[in-house]
Amino acid sequence: MKFALLLIALSLPAMHALAQVVPVQFSTNQSTATNAPIFRANTNGAGASSAESLTNSTPTTNAPYKIPPNRILEFSVPLTPAARLAIANSQNPPIDFARAALAVPFGFDPEIPTPILLVSGSSDGEASSIRVLPAFTNVALRLGWVVIAVDGPHGKPPNDSPPWRWGLISSLLDHMNKNWPGSRQWPIVAAGFSGGAKWSGVVGAILAQRGYNLVGVFMGGVNQDMASKAASLYDPAVRFKRTPIYLSSGTKDKIATPQHHEEVKESLLSAGFSTVRLDTYDGGHGLSDSELQKALKWFVELYSKPPEAKPLQPNQFEPNPAIIK
């Protein structure tokens, strides 16, 4: 019944849910990492939001307990001890905090498990996941998902590597679980487009290995299979290879062509991934809202199957009743 309600919610007519960005400026002074400014987002009045800049030599957990819906909040999170070790192993300068972005849907209640969409950006350009997050929010928020992304505090790192990215991501997820106890068990999907799609395959492998409730990987505009390579690095990958993977290909894409997507699909199947779906849309090298919507609905549909038919371990996932209103 719980899953049926969620599926009904996802089939309702779409409502426009454009996320508004709450701008927060972070220090660009790379020489004062230990004195990085801490930003405390808070809510004043009926949905109004503000950001207060605080300077503290010891970064503290500072994301709000109550977050206004359909807004992208940017804030800092301190690195966990394990993340500091990962950053040290990433061949990058040490840092003390990460920049995080988070958006929650209308009716969000942290007491009710809610699916999480973790967005990864490409290593090209600014190598920013936060910058591409708004491309995913309209669809994901409308369907009742929490959307998150995380970057380093000073822009693109010298070495954009798995230890670097996982150090940032794991710190954000730990921060969320401290504020929203139990969120570590919420269903989570790794998603990205183009270079970000390649990273979503790597991030998915790490999430599965670390015991997170990974229920899907979305790869749009992808021309190389990094998920299979990551599966060979982050053993055991048995659960990861049971995770549904959705490939989204634009028929007019000249960068990640339909042929590239066919090759990625075959590579994944050959590596032992059991549930791989490839869909196409009329378009070029750009994220398709309709494809993302289909993918998120598909992940929920597979996750909500009876335990004996599910490719993943069962877990608690009760939809927020406010979403179906």
Image (tube, rainbow, N blue to C red):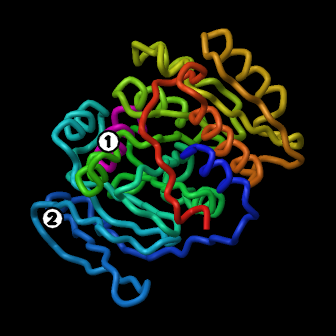
Amino acid type of the residue tagged 2 in the rendering: Asn
The image shows residue 15 at horizontal and vertical percentages of: 70, 70
| Image vertical order of residue 35 relative to residue 244, above or below | below
Judged from the image, the secondary structure of the residue bearing numbered disc 2 is: helix
Specify the farthest residue to the front.
Answer: 1
Which is nearer the eye, 63 or 127? Answer: 63
Mark 2 surroundings within 10 Å by alpha-carbon count, few (fewer than 14), some (14 through 19), many (20 or more): some
Residue designated by label 1: 170
The image shows residue 319 at horizontal and vertical percentages of: 51, 52
- Asked whether residue 165 is drawn in magenta, I would say yes
The image shows residue 90 at horizontal and vertical percentages of: 31, 33
Residue sitting at x 71%, y 33%: 247
Judged from the image, the secondary structure of the residue bearing numbered disc 1 is: helix
Range of magenta residues: 160-173
Amino acid type of the residue tagged 1 in the rendering: Ser
Q: Quadrant of residue 270?
A: top right
In the image, taking residue 97 as reference, residue 268 lies left or right, namely right
In the image, taking residue 61 as reference, residue 48 lies left or right, namely right
Specify the farthest residue to the left.
Answer: 57
| Image vertical order of residue 304 relative to residue 142, above or below | above
- Asked whether residue 97 is drawn in magenta, I would say no
In the image, taking residue 277 as reference, residue 35 lies left or right, namely left
Residue sitting at x 54%, y 30%: 201
How far is the residue under mark 2 from the one under mark 1? 22 Å
Residue sitting at x 42%, y 49%: 113
The answer to which of marks 2 and 1 sits earlier in the sequence is 2
Mark 1 surroundings within 10 Å by alpha-carbon count, few (fewer than 14), some (14 through 19), many (20 or more): many
Residue designated by label 2: 35
- What is the quadrant of the C terminus in the image? bottom right
Dominant SS of magenta comes to: helix
Residue sitting at x 26%, y 73%: 40
